[in-house]
C-alpha cells in the first residue's frame, strides 16, 4: 500500500459521505465495519496467527483468515509475520514500527514503506505451509473489494462510502493506535524491555488490545486484560467459543507470572531497560 492510494482512500471516504449522507443502514454497516471486523484482527490476526495463543480447527483458521483480509490490512501471513518481527525486536533498531523512530512512522509510515511490502515468510512458516492461507494471502485485495461490493448491495452509495470506506479508515487508525499511542501514552505495570503501556481508551476501542504492557510482558496469552477490571472483549468472546468447542487451549498467565516483575509506580518509564525477564518464554512462538 503506497501513500497515494492510502490518502485517496481517506478522501473518497470523506467526500462520498458528504455527497450521499448517512442512512440508518449505512450507520449499522459502519459500526460493524469498525467493531465487527476488528475482532478478526484482535482474535485472528493478532492472538491466533501472530501469537498462537489458542488452538482451533483448520476450517475456523480459514474463517479467521478470510475475516481478516476483509479488514483491508493485507493478508494474515504479512500481518502476523511482521508482528512477530516487532516482538522479536521491540524498540530495537530492527523493530518494524517502534515509536522511537517517530510517532507517525509507528502509526502508519512503516505500512506505506516498500521495504515491508512482502510477508516475512521465514517468520510465519507454521502458517505459510497451508495452501488455503497462501491463497487468501495472494488474493487479499480481492476479498477487500468484495466487502466493499457487499456494503454497496446492502446499503447503496451511503453504505459503500460511509459504511465501507469510512468504516475502514476508522478501523485502520483504531488498529494503528496500538503500535503508536500504546507505546507512548498510558501506564506501565510490568518491567519489559520496550516502551509498551496499558491504555484504557485503546483497550475499549480495540476490544482489549490496549492492555499493551500486559501483552508485551506475556505475549503468548489469549487474555490481554489480566484482571477482571481490565475489559477485554476479545478474550471473553474466545472463552465463549471455547465453551462451544470451536477454539481450545486458551493460554493465560499464571498467578506467579501476574505477581512478578511489577513496577512500583505505573508511570515510571523504564521501557528501555533490556531486562529480558520474560524474553525466553515470549520468543518461543517466534522461533
Image (cartoon, helix red, strand yellow):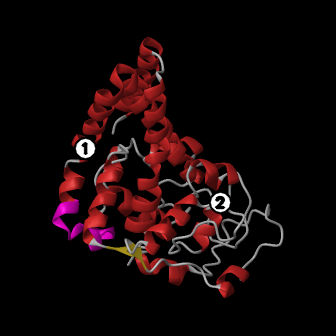
Is the magenta region chiefly helix, strand or loop? Answer: helix
Residue 167 located within the stretch drawn in magenta: no
Within 10 Å of the Cα at label 2, are there few (<14), some (14-19), or many (20+) other Cα atoms? many
Give the camera-side residue of 81 and 105: 81
Would residue 119 be seen by someone viewing this image from the given angle?
Answer: no
- Residue 217 picture quarter: bottom right
On the image, numbered disc 2 is attached to which residue? Answer: 231
Q: Identify the residue shown where x is 58% and y is 58%.
A: 208
The N terminus appears in which quarter of the rendering? top left
Judging from the image, what secondary structure is the residue with disc 2 in? loop
- Residue 46 picture quarter: bottom left
Against 283, is 152 above or below? above
The C terminus appears in which quarter of the rendering? bottom left
In this picture, residue 52 sits left or right of residue 221: left
Q: Identify the residue shown where x is 67% and y is 48%.
A: 201
Tell me where residue 11 appears, x and y as whole percent.
43, 22
What is the spatial separation of the Cα atoms under label 1 and label 2, in whole angstroms? 31 Å
On the image, numbered disc 1 is attached to which residue? Answer: 143
Q: Which of marks 1 and 2 is nearer the N terminus?
A: 1
The answer to the question of whether label 1 and label 2 lie on touching residues, with beta carbons closer than 8 A, is no
Name of the residue lying farthest toward the right? 265
Tell me where residue 30 appears, x and y as whole percent.
46, 34
**Magenta range:** 122-133
Q: Identify the residue shown where x is 30% and y is 59%.
A: 63
Against 34, is 97 above or below? below
Judging from the image, what secondary structure is the residue with disc 1 in? helix
Closer to the observer: label 1 or label 2? 2
- Residue 80 picture quarter: bottom left
Checking the image for residue 83, the label placed there is none
Against 76, is 56 above or below? below
Amino acid at each position: 500500500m503506497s501513500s497515494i492510494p492510502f490518502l485517496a482512500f481517506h478522501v473518497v471516504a470523506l467526500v462520498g459521505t458528504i455527497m450521499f449522507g448517512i442512512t440508518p443502514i449505512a450507520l449499522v454497516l459502519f459500526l460493524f465495519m469498525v467493531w465487527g471486523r476488528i475482532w478478526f484482527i484482535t482474535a485472528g490476526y493478532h492472538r491466533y496467527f501472530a501469537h498462537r495463543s489458542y488452538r482451533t480447527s483448520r476450517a475456523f483458521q480459514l474463517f479467521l483468515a478470510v475475516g481478516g483480509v476483509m479488514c483491508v490490512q493485507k493478508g494474515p501471513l504479512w500481518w502476523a509475520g511482521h508482528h512477530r518481527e516487532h516482538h522479536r525486536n521491540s524498540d530495537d533498531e530492527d523493530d518494524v514500527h517502534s515509536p522511537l523512530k517517530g510517532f507517525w512512522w509507528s502509526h502508519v509510515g512503516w505500512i506505506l514503506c516498500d521495504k515491508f511490502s512482502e510477508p516475512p515468510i521465514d517468520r510465519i512458516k507454521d502458517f505459510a505451509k497451508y495452501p488455503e492461507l497462501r491463497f487468501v494471502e495472494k488474493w487479499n485485495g480481492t476479498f477487500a473489494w468484495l466487502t466493499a461490493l457487499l456494503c454497496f448491495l446492502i446499503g447503496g452509495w451511503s453504505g459503500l462510502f460511509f459504511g465501507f470506506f469510512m468504516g475502514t479508515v476508522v478501523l485502520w487508525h483504531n488498529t494503528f493506535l496500538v503500535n503508536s499511542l500504546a507505546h507512548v501514552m498510558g501506564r506501565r505495570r510490568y518491567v519489559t524491555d520496550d516502551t509498551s503501556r496499558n491504555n484504557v481508551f485503546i483497550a475499549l476501542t480495540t476490544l482489549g488490545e490496549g492492555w499493551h504492557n500486559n501483552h508485551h510482558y506475556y505475549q503468548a496469552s489469549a487474555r490481554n486484560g489480566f484482571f477482571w477490571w481490565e475489559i477485554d472483549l476479545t478474550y471473553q468472546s474466545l472463552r465463549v467459543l471455547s465453551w462451544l468447542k470451536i477454539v481450545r487451549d486458551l493460554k493465560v498467565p499464571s498467578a506467579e507470572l501476574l505477581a512478578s516483575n511489577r513496577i512500583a509506580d505505573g508511570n515510571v518509564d523504564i521501557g528501555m531497560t533490556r531486562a529480558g525477564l520474560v524474553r525466553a518464554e515470549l520468543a518461543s512462538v517466534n522461533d
